[in-house]
Image: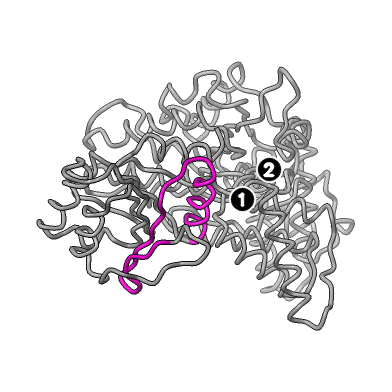
Amino acid sequence: MSELQDLTALIRANTPLIVIETRDEARVVELFRQALMHVWRALHRWSITEGLRRIDLDREDEADVAPDATTTLQSIRDATQRGIYLLLDFHPYLGYASTQRMLRDILQRRDCQPHVLVLVGHKVELPPELDSLAVRYTPRMPDANALLKLVREEAENYARENGGRRVEVDGEAVQQIVRNLRGLDPIDARRIARHLIFDDGALGPSDLPQLAKLKFELLNRSGHLHYEYDSARMDDVAGARRFKRWIEQRRAVFVSGEAPAGLDPPKGVLLLGVQGCGKSMLAKAVAAGFGVPLVRLDFGTLYDKFHGETERNLRAALGSAEQLEPCVLWIDEIEKGLAGDGGDSDGGVSRRVLGYLLTWMAERKSRVFLVATANQIDALPPELLRKGRFDEIFFVDLPAGDAREQLFALHLKKRALDPARFDLPALAAASEGFSGAEIEQAIVAALYAAHAAQTPLGDFTLRAELKQTRPLSVLMGEQVQALREWALSRTVPAD
């Protein structure tokens, strides 16, 4: 059913009390005006500043009732013609017992017509005895056609305010902008569209990062998500050839949101591996590979000492991520946020958080691609590893020889050094067992040594630093080897 059909059905059923939470009061009023074309009622609107007035006529009547709540309810109860009453920001006045009693009399049809009362506000909280009588109605978010119309209106506004100068438009970029505005109400969508247009008088590919940033700042009211501005390209990550190919095969389906018949849309991956081997870089590279924003969920900020607040925080964070679609949601070191022992040492909070996360992973329809990273496989709950939770579980191992050569080249270029001046195969051989992070730190340490000696960085200094370093694969050799052996037959190698 359409939005208008849903609303018309509620009116036809003479629903006593409808609650609508929205900031766009004008849109709600217009929806009820349209509903009158299908089911006739007298339509009234009330606010504390204007009082009660009828608005379904060709012109709006002057208010004929004082604006206070008690007089308004008395007028509604005495009305001889059934009607629809839109009460804007009326709920704060329900704290009085007399007002509640009068409203309940109207809702229970005591000596009055079967009116439909509608409480409209940004956030409507009702006393329990009234909440049980209310039906909450949520206006649908604008679809692609409505958003495109909105963008065109703002382009026309720009032309009017700038002496007829037309907005420079890239058609494909506009379609992407409209797709990224999905999930926003008309007020916020219009504000962002206006910002993009009036910034430079154009709509093009360069507006997409700014749109993502504005949308994130708007939706992340919970503060539990972090927008990652510095995403990495796939070329910035050494090795991981199998993983890169896997992502590229799914890019078109994820970005378009239209999976061919019989093909499930990509949902997410779990990246296991040795610390420092590039799992975080790969998570960032997924967003760049898909060409969508990257947001990181920090489990540490979710936990709250009050009962139920942690789960509510998780729902709010995941809800914000869904409104940012299409996007990549990155949960770093997920094992630290979820209990794997099944105990109740924290009152069962971690188990409830895990349960909600698993339900969300299984049932979500939004284009949110989940990338979770983990270092300790034994700390992960078994439910998370069951087949079907993730599309695939990849293992990011210690880099092989050719990947170590790439790592040296990448980190040397990053520091404005020419890799051609170095014997990369020899450096790769000298760094057997090193992770990518350890190779980078060896280069940093060698640069400090060369600076202190006032000499250019060379192979000798680099090899000397590598020789002095004890990598994690040596310091914690047993644990690293156990992890690699576990992953050998249970995961897909990233490289």
Occupied quadrant, residue 350: top left
Q: Where, quadrant-wise, is the C terminus in this rendering?
A: top right
Find out whether the residues at labels 2 and 1 contact each other: C-beta distance under 8 Å: yes
Q: Give me the C-alpha separation between circle 2 and circle 1.
A: 9 Å
Q: How is the image coloured?
A: one colour
**In this image, 203 relative to 29: left or right?**
right
Task: Please provide percent x and percent y for residue 77.
Answer: 22, 52
Q: Residue furthest front?
A: 80
Task: Please provide percent x and percent y for residue 36.
Answer: 49, 47
Task: Please provide percent x and percent y for residue 340.
Answer: 36, 28
| Magenta stretch contains residue 28 | yes
Is 69 located above or below residue 234 in the figure? Answer: below
Mark 1 neighbour density, 10 Å: few (under 14) some (14–19) many (20 or more): many
Q: Secondary structure at mark 1?
A: strand
| Residue at position x 71%, y 75% in the image | 199
Q: Which mark is residue 294?
A: 1
Task: Tell me the kind of residue under disc 2.
Answer: Val
Task: Tell me the kind of residue under disc 1.
Answer: Leu
Whichever of labels 2 and 1 marks the residue nearer the N terminus, that label is: 2
Q: Residue furthest right?
A: 420
Q: Secondary structure at mark 2?
A: helix
Out of 484 and 140, give the one closest to the viewer. Answer: 140
Q: Which mark is residue 432?
A: none
Residue under label 2, please give it: 286
Q: Where are the magenta residues, as a range?
A: 26-54
**In this image, 75 relative to 199: left or right?**
left
| Magenta stretch contains residue 437 | no
Q: Residue furthest left?
A: 97
Q: Where, quadrant-wise, is the N terminus in this rendering?
A: top right
| Residue at position x 59%, y 56% in the image | 228
Out of 453 and 110, give the one closest to the viewer. Answer: 110
